Image (cartoon, rainbow, N blue to C red):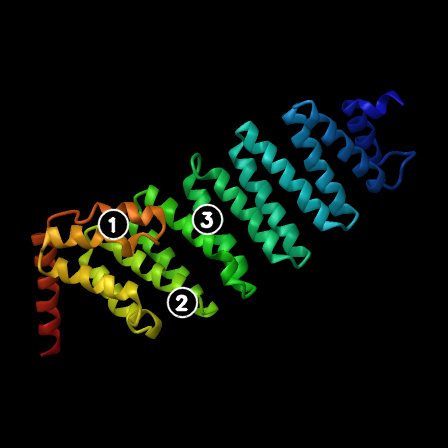
Amino acid sequence: MASSSDPDKLMSKADKLTKLSFTRWNADWKSATSLYEQAAIAYRFRKDNEKAKDAFEKASKGQEMISSPWDAAKHMESAAALAKELGRWNEVSDFYHRASELYRECGRPQPASDALAKGASALEEKSPDEAIKMYDEACSVLEEDGKEQMAFDLYRAAAALYIKMEKYSDAASFFLRLGSAADKCNAINSQCKAYLSAIIIYLYAHDFQQAQKCYNDCSEVQAFLNSDQNRCATKLLSAYEESDAEEIKRIAQSSAFNHLDHVVIRLARKLPTGDLQAIKKADDGEESLDEDDLT
């Protein structure tokens, strides 16, 4: 039939099958969905992304109507990828969110998280705040299912984006979240690297007090206390306490930092930042206040 190769005619026929009339009392979603799928593939082959996106969106709706959320999610991801090509950033977020919801309906947290991560990655440049939210949700989906180890790359991606946005405290928080997840998985190396990364980020942001607090808190974890990363952090903080810029540079350039994420290595190589004397004075001021509190 001529209509079989004409996606416009396929769409028209499918639309008619889903609309009720005096002669059609029940929508034929099964037949319509097959036509929408054929049209979507044909449009995509023609590189008519706008119409392909709409066809995949309708095919997704059709799969939902015939109780096939897995296929509905797949089609929604296809629509999201085309929305990205078209620069429809709100739709990118909406479609990947919907795909994730559909995967969760199937009881499949991994692809549900993956869909959110794809959306986050697509939105990093154009809508970084939304990308962060999606990375956060993607991590949460896996955490809720007890699959934290599958989220390690997502924590890192979110932290890297926060660094790019110069939101250093938030970046450090994501590395600490990674450390906590690694602790649950007994992934000691990842845990220790995450803690050291957080300390470096606080130092880069001139927040010696928070870096020291982070170090103290993390050192309560036995695995970190006995690690090479802890020894690096100890030396680095000691150099800061002595306001020894050359020693800070020497430690930060050492090979011990080479196994951290690239974004963290770049920050470490720039240490020290800020006025070391001012940092030390601020810390001393806090200590004297603490001593007063004890009396």
Q: Amino acid at mark 3?
A: Lys
The total of numbered circles placed on residues is 3
Seen from the viewer's position, the closer of residues 111 and 196 is 196
Dot 2: few (<14), some (14–19), or many (≥20) neighbours within 10 Å? some
- Name the residue carrying label 2: 188
Query: Residue at coordinates 40% horizontally, 61% vertically from top-left?
Result: 190
- Residue 189: x %, y % from top left: 39, 63
Q: Could you tell me if residue 18 is visible in this image? A: no
Earlier in the chain: of badge 2 and badge 1, it is 2
Q: Say left or right for 156 vs 10.
A: left
- Residue 145: x %, y % from top left: 56, 64
| Image quadrant in which you'd find residue 207 | bottom left
Residue 133, numbered circle? 3
Find numbered disc 1 in the image and state the secondary structure of the residue it sits on. Answer: helix
Q: CA distance from mark 1 to mark 3?
A: 27 Å
Residue 237, numbered circle? none
Residue 268, numbered circle? 1
Earlier in the chain: of badge 2 and badge 3, it is 3
